[in-house]
Image (tube, rainbow, N blue to C red):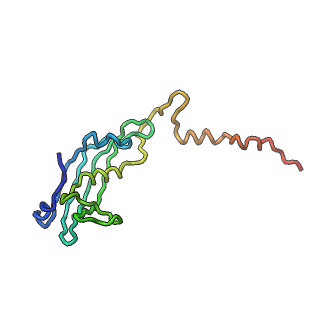
């Protein structure tokens, strides 16, 4: 398993205090156990570099993440594969930082990218996904899923029952 983890000493020993990486990563099924909006990931590739700056005791990561996420269809709940690609610049501090800074605090002297990568992927999950080519919408006893266009067309001719009595109202002169 690829950890994408470096200690401060490893970064100091690297050429120019910079480590480049291009890795294919996988996440175990347990990562998705508590997530209803993401069922899985495949073909996830992470590339970029991690640079340590000794002046401010921080590491700077440039990340490029791409792959395929498996999410439920909003209508049928069937699996839908959605490709994604995101880039990010993340900052890791080896010292305590204030809460208003957008910086990840390192545990000990280790920069760990995997949890940050997973969070970046979670931010790419679409709110609504519809599987292309749905022929039949689900229905059950007393309910059914309908297309929005059909619903609007059906409701256009219907009069609001609260205003139905106004139809009988005649203005007398």
Q: Residue at position x 52%, y 36% from top?
A: 146
Q: Nearer the viewer, residue 117 or 70?
A: 117
Residue 21 x/y as whole percent: 17, 56
Q: How many numbered marks are there? A: 0
Query: Which quadrant of the view contains residue 53?
Result: bottom left
Q: Residue at position x 22%, y 57% from top?
A: 107
Residue 89 x/y as whole percent: 28, 62
Residue 16 x/y as whole percent: 13, 67
Query: Which quadrant of the view contains residue 70?
Result: top left
Query: Which residue ends up furthest to the right in the rendered image?
Result: 173
Give the left or right position of residue 62, taking residue 101 as reference.
left
In the depicted structure, whether residue 146 falls above or below residue 65: above
Q: Residue at position x 53%, y 27% from top?
A: 141
Q: Nearer the viewer, residue 9 or 150?
A: 9
Give the left or right position of residue 156, taking residue 43 as reference.
right
In the depicted structure, whether residue 141 falls above or below residue 150: above
Q: The N terminus lies in which quarter of the figure?
A: top left
């Amino acid at each position: 398993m690829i950890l994408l983890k470096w200690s401060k000493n490893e970064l100091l020993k690297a050429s120019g205090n910079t480590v480049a990486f291009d890795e294919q990563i996988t996440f175990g099924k347990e990562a998705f156990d508590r997530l209803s909006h993401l069922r899985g990931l495949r073909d996830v590739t992470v590339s970029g570099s991690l640079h340590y700056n000794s002046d401010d005791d921080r590491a700077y990561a440039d990340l490029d993440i791409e792959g395929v996420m498996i999410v439920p269809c909003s209508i049928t709940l069937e699996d839908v594969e959605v490709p994604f690609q995101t880039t990010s610049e993340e900052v890791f501090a080896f010292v305590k930082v204030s809460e208003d800074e957008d910086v990840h605090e390192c545990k000990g002297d280790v920069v760990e990218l995997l949890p940050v990568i997973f969070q970046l992927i979670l931010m790419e999950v679409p709110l609504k996904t519809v599987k292309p080519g749905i022929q039949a919408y689900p229905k059950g006893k007393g309910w059914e899923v309908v297309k929005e266009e059909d619903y609007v067309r059906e409701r256009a001719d219907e009069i609001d029952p609260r205003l139905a009595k106004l139809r009988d109202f005649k203005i007398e002169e």
